[in-house]
């Protein structure tokens, strides 16, 4: 089990950010029971999520707020929108989280993984999370963000 950081892009003007993020993430939810046969469609990537969340709270704006001593269970009681929702054009080129951004989910529901080939084969699990940020992924991520300048970037902690 592991937590990792992604950015979910919701259209600018979205009134209910939590609902908007939830709808975009829903197709990627880990089923309670894995099917024996491979299924078509999105690969499972999470079994729990929250906007913000240790240690990623504030990372989308490049200013993480450290929450020493706060465990996942107590933090997961609610989403923290403040500091975790910003216009795409304010997302910094680099992130304060040393592991970086594992994926970007665009408003069309597409999951852009730092290692798309690996994701297409296996989905996301703790062993497929990035050890570092490759320049190729950083460039691709920034290109994706550049195509969605009218969106809001939401920093999300996923659990798998």
Image: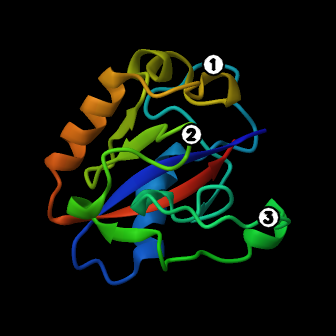
- In the picture, the disc for residue 98 is 2
Numbered disc 3: secondary structure: loop
Q: Which residue is mark 3?
A: 68
Are circles 1 and 2 on residues that touch, CB within 8 Å? no
Residue 115: x, y in percent?
A: 43, 22
The answer to which of marks 3 and 1 sits earlier in the sequence is 1
How far is the residue under mark 1 from the one under mark 2?
36 Å
Residue 124's place in the image compared with 60, above or below, is above
The answer to which of marks 1 and 2 sits earlier in the sequence is 1
In the image, farthest residue toward the bottom: 15
**Circle 2: is it few (<14), some (14-19), or many (20+) Cα within 10 Å?**
few
**Circle 1: is it few (<14), some (14-19), or many (20+) Cα within 10 Å?**
few
Numbered disc 2: secondary structure: loop
Residue 60 is left or right of residue 132, and the answer is left
Residue 112: x, y in percent?
A: 36, 35
Residue 50's place in the image compared with 43, above or below, is below
Residue 3: x, y in percent?
A: 68, 45
Q: Which residue is mark 1?
A: 37
Residue 2's place in the image compared with 106, above or below, is above
Q: Nearer the viewer, residue 37 or 28?
A: 28
């Amino acid at each position: 089990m592991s937590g990792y950081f992604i950015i979910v892009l919701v259209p600018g003007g979205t009134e209910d950010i939590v609902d908007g993020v939830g709808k975009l993430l829903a197709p990627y939810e880990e089923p309670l029971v894995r099917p024996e046969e491979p299924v078509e469609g999105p690969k499972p990537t999470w079994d729990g999520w929250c906007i913000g969340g240790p240690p990623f709270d504030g990372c989308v704006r490049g200013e993480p707020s450290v929450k020493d001593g706060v465990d996942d269970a107590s933090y997961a009681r609610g989403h923290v929108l403040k500091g975790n929702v910003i216009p795409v054009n304010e997302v910094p080129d680099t992130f304060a989280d040393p592991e970086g951004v594992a994926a970007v989910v665009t408003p069309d529901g597409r999951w852009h993984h730092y290692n798309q080939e690996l994701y297409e084969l296996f989905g996301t699990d703790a062993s497929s999370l990035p050890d570092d940020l490759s320049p190729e992924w950083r460039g691709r991520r920034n290109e994706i963000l550049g195509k969605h300048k009218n969106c809001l970037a939401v920093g999300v902690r996923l659990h798998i």
